[in-house]
Image (cartoon, rainbow, N blue to C red):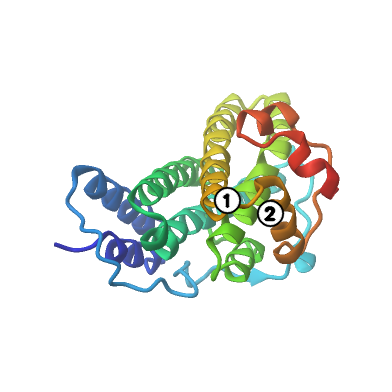
Amino acid sequence: MISVFEAIRGALLTGDPRDKVMATRRLVRQWRKGDLGFAPNAEMPDRPAWPAELELLPPNRMPKRGRGGSLRGQIALWHSLAHIEFVAIDLALDMAGRFGAEMGEEFVGDFLAVAADEAMHFALIDRKLRQLGSHYAALPAHDGLWEAAMETRHDVAARLAVVPMVLEARGLDVTPGTLERIRAQGDENGAKILERILDDEIRHVRTGASHFARFCAKAGLEPKNHWKMLVQEHFRGALKPPFNDSARLAAGLSRDYYSPVV
């Protein structure tokens, strides 16, 4: 019987976007059916495979998107969202594969569920891009999300603190404004996609926050203080308001987590 860790590694090393989505869905189905073992017999790659034609640029060299209502602006926006969701598949897979042996089967199952959601989000956005006459990897993208993964690859608490509880939580702050702009342009289909993503991301952040709290409880650490220490040590950016306090609270992040760090 193949192990879940081998299956995760295989999905991480799948570069074609549609094939990665299918590989992720397949391994999640196999895990839920009990068809995968739990032997930690496969190391996770330092980098996942991405489309060969995808140009990666530093964040400060990314081209401006243009006006949001123009076709060029719409394509740039949806391409940036596609990249976020594509990398999010790998972030969730890597979380399960890299730290699953240490954290246990429930942890693996929870983050494989996140990976399945991210694969669905990417598929929805990829379809949207193609309807606009473009596709993922047609434009440059930046590597900041995976840089955060590499920064925290040796510490599950740091990974939980930075990826779900900072980077994904930031999506809770910015997505409502993007959703309103898209709806104001008359794009109800796009608005529905973002509504679905926002609902799911609340659950994803809550998954990360819950496992972080469990880790701290086992280690005898106070979660909020340990989170602040890890963010200051491992997150290179700044936590910038405004914050979507209600969505963050629903995700398990009360304001006393992040307000003193601002």
Q: At x 74% / y 37%, what residue is drawn? A: 69
* Observer-nearest of 134 and 126: 126
For residue 16, say whether it is visible: no
The extreme left residue here reads 1
Q: Which residue is mark 2?
A: 226
Q: Which residue is mark 1?
A: 216
Element carrying mark 1: helix
* Residue type beneath disc 2: His
The picture places residue 250, in percent across and down from the top left corner, at 62, 28
Q: At x 74% / y 65%, what residue is drawn? A: 233
* Residue type beneath disc 1: Cys
Return the mark for residue 12. Answer: none
In this rendering, position of residue 30 left or right of residue 155 = left
Check the image and report above or below for 220 versus 254.
Answer: below
Q: At x 35% / y 67%, what residue is drawn? A: 9
Q: At x 66% / y 48%, what residue is drawn? A: 222
For the residues marked 2 and 1, what is the alpha-carbon distance in whole angstroms?
8 Å
Look at the numbered discs 2 and 1 and tell me whether their residues touch, using CB distance below 8 Å. yes
Check the image and report above or below for 173 versus 85.
Answer: above
In this rendering, position of residue 221 left or right of residue 184 = left
